Image (tube, rainbow, N blue to C red):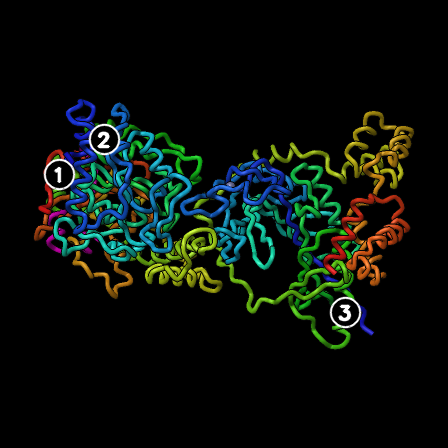
């Protein structure tokens, strides 16, 4: 039962084939059996079963167990963002995303591990120990939403929520063989999400299928009076709009992106591209600003925002004092502080924003020619545990392919398209802002024609 | 001998009287409320909380700018001013840096550099060796009016500041009450030879002065102090000074080792704000008749300057006069004035200042009262009465106790 996709689990609950209690229990059993090894969860909701008993299965997510990344504030459950600065911190209010999940009838199963403060792409910077990849526990799950991606791959929950600043949904989904969907910046509220880089943070789903991602997104998206950066545009019913049969789309493959890929992974991505051609789409090579330039832009903007966003954790009103910050957070605070200092602002922050504008314009002109672009979430498969040691730019190098689209606030998906030595490989699609429906449609067409996303690890 | 000329500029902070705070839904009226009863995740800087700007506060800031003859930036934004202080819960203040809502205005011949919007901080309360923080004031909308350093006399400064207060009250955007802190003055003062046109290479900042009378005194004191230093060949130090009400002097505050680097950058949680010319013109058309216009109208109606001053300063009197704008009506309104009971006492600000003088002149009285000889209170009250006439006895007594306790 815990293996079911969200759509199937919902169907089973509605038809009373099984109860929410049984579904939640099967997930909890899986966690008890395997999470010592995987370490996807930091906290399990002790009320999950009693909430399942009262579940109203007529609601859109009635009785569905959802795992939530530990940077979403949840009343009654500790929220730490995997940092000991917030050890055992109990929030006073509920994040908009989890509030919407609860109102839709979902059961928050627990809080998942992540890189501390979302700083990283491996979960190795978590102060509570890293998560392991369910496909091979010698390997990393990716990050920062590594706990959510591993929980999906290991069938410990029916659906999961992550957040992406640059790759933090799509890259761990890719490494764990899950479906990761990053909505447009401003499509989903950031209220109650512990901020990493405010100008790019985007909450989104990590699921077993594209259909599941569509359903979850349509519930968590929308304008929020508590987040001034959310869009007032109405939210389409993605679970319907994704089934529209778009044909003959023009899809571009930026050659600069393929150049960054490892040869074997690139081969699998090109096979996926062939599949899209078979499905009736016109795919052709194109050229974009090389993604390596995004590393500099992203690093400066993100570190600057981090240095300011973490200033509130002074230990005066809540949390522990600053000595509990880990090395990675300290490095980022120092670099961001430096980049914003007088005399350096023009050289770094201001220049980065100018380059950011150029990257956005570059995408604008690309989307004049193409409906979608191919954008793999990672240059290759998962890396081994310990790979981040002495690699302060590890995340930026792993996320090089998704940083440009994050900087530009675009929407994108990452879906499995093969395996290398038993580790999943994914390819991705990105669309212009608020083109979620189109991205989901094509990704769904691909999943209907392939079964890579149905493979399960042998844990 | 060189004669000296002061160079003075102002930064005035005004707390807006909006219903809610600048970036959250908490009440903005914090005066006298029990500590930390008007707070929420946003103004406490809890994890994950985000600011949503108060549209009314933006409108009022721009209306003040328009009343001060400013140009309005059609594209504006908020910025983060980063610094650490326990009363600043986010570790940064949301303010405006290089694109303030209003700029380049003029009032009574003095140039207004800018008028921008920001948020107030919490308040530190020092009690029994401990420091407590009250966040009721955290996030209250604060307008900052910055002038050019183009004031050359204390008299000019005084007239300007009172006119600014009067405009704010006419717009009904703030009580602009200095004792309650809804209007706060900071003066930058330096001194140069009378025949020089260059700005001096230093300036002294006077902070935390809570009355017109004291800012006047502080400026006068500074002009004398700095002129004497310059005459003796010493360049005054660039520093921040406070004003001691009891001594009537400015006092150096602990100087910061280095200039602050606030690491300003655009607030990513709030998108840039755009206005149309139509929007600005609508707001301009909604401005009430400003004090200068009211005075001109009264003069045109044939009132004497003295009557104009009295009637223009009081909305009630002005309205009453306008019902029947005749000389006879003006006579009757102005002559009725002293019968109003609340205006028969001098202001508590004036009372306090006289009380301080009387106490300072009678050091023995301090020792006596501290020793429990309360009959001395009567003597002090008598002395104060001699200067001020009719006084509010309970209030004056309270002030005397406060002043003596701090001696
Ligand atoms: Zn508040």
For the residues labelled 3 and 2, the Cα–Cα distance comes to: 78 Å
Tell me which segment is drawn in magenta. A247-269
Q: Point out the image quarter for the C terminus of chain B.
A: bottom right
Q: Which mark is residue A277?
A: 1
Q: Nearer the viewer, residue A454 or A81?
A: A81
Against A312, is B231 above or below? below
**Residue drawn 14% across the image and 43% down it:** A273
Q: Point out the image quarter for the N terminus of chain B.
A: bottom right
Is residue A260 part of the magenta span, yes or no? Answer: yes
Label 2: element kind: loop
**Residue drawn 43% across the image and 48% down it:** B268
Indicate if the residue with disc 3 has its beta carbon within 8 Å of ligand 1. Answer: no
For the residues labelled 2 and 1, the Cα–Cα distance comes to: 19 Å
Are there few (<14), some (14-19), or many (20+) residues within 10 Å of tag 3? many
The residue that mark 2 highlights is: A242
Which image quadrant for residue B360?
A: bottom right
- Discs 3, 2: same chain: no
The residue that mark 3 highlights is: B227
Which image quadrant for residue A311?
A: bottom left
Can you give x and y, in whole percent of width and height, for residue B64 in the image? Answer: 65, 41
For the residues labelled 3 and 1, the Cα–Cα distance comes to: 84 Å
Quick one: which residue is furthest to the bottom in this view? B233
């Amino acid at each position: 039962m815990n293996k079911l996709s969200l759509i199937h689990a919902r169907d089973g609950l509605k038809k009373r084939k099984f109860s929410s209690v049984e579904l939640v229990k099967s997930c909890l059993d899986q966690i008890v059996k395997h999470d010592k090894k995987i370490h996807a969860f930091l906290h399990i909701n002790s009320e999950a079963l009693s909430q399942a008993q009262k579940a109203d299965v007529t609601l859109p997510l009635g009785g569905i167990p959802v795992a939530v990344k530990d940077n979403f504030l949840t009343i009654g459950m500790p929220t730490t963002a995997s940092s000991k600065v917030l050890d055992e911190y109990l929030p006073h209010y509920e994040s908009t995303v989890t509030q919407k999940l609860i109102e839709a009838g979902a059961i928050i199963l627990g809080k998942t591990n992540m890189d501390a403060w979302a700083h990283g792409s491996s979960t190795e910077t978590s102060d509570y120990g890293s998560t392991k990849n369910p496909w091979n526990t010698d390997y990393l799950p990716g990050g920062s939403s590594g706990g959510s991606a591993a929980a999906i791959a290991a069938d410990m929950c029916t659906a999961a929520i992550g957040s992406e600043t640059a790759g933090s949904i799509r890259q761990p989904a890719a490494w764990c063989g899950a479906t990761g969907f990053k909505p447009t910046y401003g499509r989903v509220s950031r209220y109650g999400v512990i901020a990493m880089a405010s100008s790019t943070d985007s909450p989104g789903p990590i699921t077993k299928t594209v259909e599941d991602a569509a359903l979850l997104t349509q519930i968590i998206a929308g304008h929020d009076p508590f987040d001034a950066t959310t869009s007032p545009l109405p939210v389409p019913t993605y679970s319907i709009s994704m089934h529209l049969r778009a044909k003959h789309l023009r899809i571009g493959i930026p050659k600069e992106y393929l150049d960054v890929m490892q040869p074997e992974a690139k081969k699998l991505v090109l096979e996926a591209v062939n599949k899209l051609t078979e499905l009736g789409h016109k795919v052709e090579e194109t050229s974009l600003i090389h993604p390596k330039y995004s590393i500099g832009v992203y690093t400066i903007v993100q570190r600057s925002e981090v240095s300011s966003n973490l200033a509130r954790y002074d230990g005066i009103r809540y949390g522990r004092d600053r000595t509990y910050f880990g090395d990675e957070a300290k490095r980022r605070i120092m670099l961001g502080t430096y980049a914003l200092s007088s005399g350096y602002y023009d050289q770094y922050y201001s220049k980065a924003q100018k380059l950011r504008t150029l990257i956005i314009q570059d995408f604008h002109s690309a989307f004049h020619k193409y409906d979608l672009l191919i954008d793999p979430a990672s240059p290759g498969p998962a890396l081994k545990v310990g790979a981040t040691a002495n690699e302060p730019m590890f995340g930026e190098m792993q996320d090089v392919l998704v940083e440009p689209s994050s900087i530009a606030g675009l929407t994108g998906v990452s879906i499995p398209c093969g395996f290398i030595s038993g580790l999943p490989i994914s390819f991705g699609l990105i669309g212009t802002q608020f083109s979620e429906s189109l991205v989901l449609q094509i990704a769904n067409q691909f999943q209907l024609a392939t079964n890579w996303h149905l493979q399960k690890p042998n844990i | 001998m060189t004669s000296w000329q002061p160079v003075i500029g102002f930064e005035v902070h005004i707390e807006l009287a909006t219903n809610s705070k600048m970036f959250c839904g908490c009440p903005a009226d914090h005066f006298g409320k029990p500590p930390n009863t008007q707070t929420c995740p946003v103004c406490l800087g809890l994890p994950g909380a985000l600011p949503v700007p108060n549209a009314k506060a933006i409108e009022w800031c721009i209306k003040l700018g328009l009343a001060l003859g400013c140009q309005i930036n059609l594209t504006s934004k908020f910025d983060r001013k980063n610094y650490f202080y326990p009363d600043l819960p986010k570790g940064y203040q949301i303010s405006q840096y290089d694109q303030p809502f209003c700029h380049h205005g003029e009032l009574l011949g003095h140039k207004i550099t800018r008028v921008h919007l920001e948020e107030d901080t919490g308040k530190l309360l020092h009690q029994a060796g401990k420091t407590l923080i009250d966040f009721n004031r955290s996030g209250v909308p604060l307008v900052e009016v910055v002038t050019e350093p183009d004031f050359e006399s204390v008299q000019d400064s005084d007239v300007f500041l009172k006119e600014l207060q009067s405009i704010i009250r006419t717009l009904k955007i703030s009580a602009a009450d200095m004792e309650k802190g809804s209007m706060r003055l900071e003066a930058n003062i330096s001194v140069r030879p009378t025949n020089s046109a260059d700005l001096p290479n230093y300036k002294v900042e006077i902070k935390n002065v809570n009355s017109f009378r004291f800012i006047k005194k502080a400026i006068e004191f500074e002009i004398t102090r700095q002129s004497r230093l310059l005459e003796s060949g010493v360049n005054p130090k660039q520093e921040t000074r406070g004003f001691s009400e009891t001594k009537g002097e400015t006092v150096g505050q602990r100087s910061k080792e280095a200039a602050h680097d606030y690491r300003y950058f655009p607030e990513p949680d709030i998108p840039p704000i755009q206005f149309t010319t139509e929007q600005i013109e609508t707001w301009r058309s909604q401005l009430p008749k400003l004090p200068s216009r009211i005075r001109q109208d009264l003069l045109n109606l044939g009132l004497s300057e003295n009557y104009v001053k009295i009637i223009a300063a009081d909305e009630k009197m002005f309205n009453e006069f306008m019902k029947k704008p005749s000389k006879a009506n003006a006579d009757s309104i102005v002559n009725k004035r002293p019968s109003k009971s609340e205006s028969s006492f001098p202001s508590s600000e004036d009372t306090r200042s006289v009380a301080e003088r009387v106490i300072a002149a009678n050091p023995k009285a301090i020792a006596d009262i501290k020793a429990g000889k309360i009959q001395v209170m009567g003597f002090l009250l008598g002395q104060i009465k001699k200067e001020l006439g009719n006084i509010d006895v309970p209030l004056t007594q309270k002030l005397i106790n406060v002043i003596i306790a701090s001696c």
